[in-house]
Amino acid sequence: MRFPLLVALSLCITISNVVNAIPCNKLSDTKAVDECYMKIALDYALIHNPQFPFGALIVDHTKNDISCYGANSNKKNRLLHGETAAFWNCTELYPSPTNNDMTDPGLNWTDQTLYTTGEPCPMCASQSIYRGVGRVVWGTSIPDLNKSGREQIMIRMEQVIQSAKLGANRPNNKIPTVTGGILKDECDKAFWCAFSNARNEKYYQKMVADGNLDYIKERESKFICNKQHDEL
């Protein structure tokens, strides 16, 4: 199946315009670089699937250059989370030279950083470990995604990483480092606005019962949603 790759190619002009507008490879400060690439991931997600703005980039941090990108494509396949699409795209764009992705991948994955607008779910966090990326950077946390109205498996990425073991329950040292909360406000707003339809009566009842009324009020005052943009 080559759907994610076709999606990437069909939108290459759009993402190229975004990349050219934000020259991340001209930056050297780590925080500035992270925010720059997260902005591209978020913009790409809002273009591709604004109702589920989970966008991802895979960046070679030794070259400060984008290797590939992806966005949530749940209308085609519910399992195509943004991170999954990005990993698939990279595997297609950089195939193993010996047709053995297990032992001879087309990329040096330890040199790659995964940028994703939402903290990876357990499935995507596991893929990050199995794929062997050197670093993961996310924007909105799993608890905030859930409080925005969407269902989540409430297992944090750090918990998944801690559970990764080699045979005989030995420590796995080939796990990514993780940085969270990059462009948090921008990512939080995108998800809060996108998931407005998921906040039904039962949602409000449970949030109030759990003492989260102030959370809702803070979000509603902080994030003014543009309905026209949300429905693109």
Image (cartoon, rainbow, N blue to C red):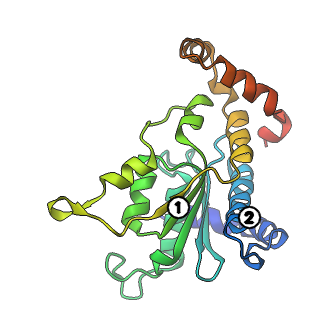
* As drawn, 210 above or below 219: above
Q: Say which element carries label 1.
A: strand
* As drawn, 124 above or below 6: above
Q: Residues within 10 Å of mark 1 (few under 14, many from 20)?
A: many
Camera-side residue of 137 and 92: 137
* As drawn, 196 above or below 172: above
Q: Residue at x 66, y 54 (%)?
A: 182
Q: Cα distance, mark 1 to mark 2?
A: 15 Å
* As drawn, 37 above or below 91: above
102 relative to 120 in the view: left or right: left
The image quadrant that residue 211 belongs to is top right
Q: Say which element carries label 2.
A: helix
The image quadrant that residue 206 belongs to is top right
Q: Amino acid at mark 2?
A: Cys
Kindly identify which residue carries mark 1.
Answer: 136
Camera-side residue of 167 and 56: 167
Q: Amino acid at mark 1?
A: Val
Q: Residues within 10 Å of mark 2 (few under 14, many from 20)?
A: some
Number of numbered labels in the structure image: 2
Q: Residue at x 53, y 40 (%)?
A: 142
Residue 1 location (% of width, % of height): 46, 63
Q: Residue at x 82, y 73 (%)?
A: 20
**Image mark for residue 36:** 2
Residue 162 location (% of width, % of height): 34, 53
Residue 167 location (% of width, % of height): 17, 64
Q: Residue furthest bottom?
A: 97
Q: Quadrant of the C terminus?
A: top right
Camera-side residue of 61 and 42: 61
Residue 47 location (% of width, % of height): 74, 52
